[in-house]
């Protein structure tokens, strides 16, 4: 029988994975039902805390509370099923494991989906260089623009500056490494 009563020892001795031990912890908390109101919300906070403790941080980005709320009917059915006989240590924790792990899987998939859709804005570095060029005063060198745009390569800065020069927006005040530039307003 797997139960919270030996949770810390079981995790320390690697008899139970941290995810399953956390599921036991949450079920045991819900079966104890220490508060008149808010036990479900507190159990979700315990879930997040235990997951963070074991290196699972998807709860920082995806609401575990929302996922449980969306599956509320299943939540109550599984909780009733897995808590039956809990006081006598004759309960079946496996329905709870399946439900609880499925909420984590749902959160992980949602996070992967969201993260996969995020793409850097095309042309963001060019826009950053152009902003620096518009706001730099007096003659300047490429090194001055590099300091204003620290995450942009020198090659990219040269490319944008040469484009501005061909468009007649910049003029070169010398040649070589120490060449200075000036904006034509």
Image (cartoon, helix red, strand yellow):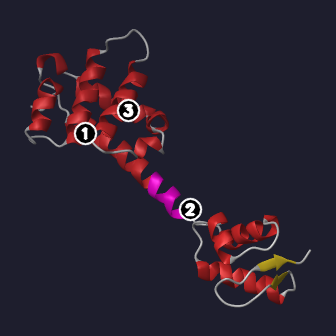
Q: Answer left or right for 171 relative to 143.
A: right
Task: Give the spatial CA distance, label 1 vs label 2.
Answer: 32 Å
According to the image, label 2 marks what residue? 118
Indicate the secondary structure of the residue bearing disc 3.
helix
Task: Give the spatial CA distance, label 2 vs label 3.
Answer: 32 Å
Binning the other alpha carbons within 10 Å of mark 2 as few (below 14), some (14 to 19) or many (20 upward) gives few
Seen from the viewer's position, the closer of residues 106 and 17 is: 17
Residue 122 showing in the rendered view: no
**Image coordinates for residue 75, horizontal then vertical, percent:** 38, 32
Q: Quadrant of the C terminus?
A: bottom right
Q: Main secondary structure of the magenta part?
A: helix
Q: Quadrant of the N terminus?
A: top left
* Range of magenta residues: 110-118
Indicate the secondary structure of the residue bearing disc 1.
helix
Seen from the viewer's position, the closer of residues 80 and 114 is: 114
**Image coordinates for residue 11, horizontal then vertical, percent:** 14, 37
Sequence order check: which comes first, mark 1 or mark 3? 3
- Give me the residue at 26% from left, 15% from top: 32
Seen from the viewer's position, the closer of residues 166 and 181 is: 181
**Image coordinates for residue 111, horizontal then vertical, percent:** 46, 53
Residue 97: which disc? 1
């Amino acid at each position: 029988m797997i139960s919270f009563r030996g949770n810390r020892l079981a995790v320390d001795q690697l008899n139970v994975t941290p995810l399953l031990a956390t599921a036991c912890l949450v079920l045991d908390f819900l079966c104890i039902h220490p508060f008149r109101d808010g036990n479900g919300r507190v159990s979700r906070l315990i879930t997040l805390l235990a997951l963070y403790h074991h290196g699972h941080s998807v709860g920082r980005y995806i609401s575990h509370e929302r996922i449980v709320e969306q599956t509320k009917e299943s939540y109550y059915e599984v909780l009733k099923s897995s808590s039956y006989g809990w006081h006598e240590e004759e309960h079946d924790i496996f329905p709870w494991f399946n439900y609880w792990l499925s909420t984590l899987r749902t959160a992980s998939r949602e996070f992967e989906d969201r993260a996969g859709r995020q793409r850097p804005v095309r042309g963001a570095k060019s826009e950053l260089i152009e902003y620096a060029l518009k706001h730099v005063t007096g003659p300047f060198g490429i090194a001055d623009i590099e300091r204003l745009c620290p995450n942009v390569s020198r090659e990219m800065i040269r490319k944008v500056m040469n484009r501005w020069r061909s468009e007649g927006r910049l003029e070169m005040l010398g040649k070589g490494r120490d060449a200075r530039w000036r904006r034509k307003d």
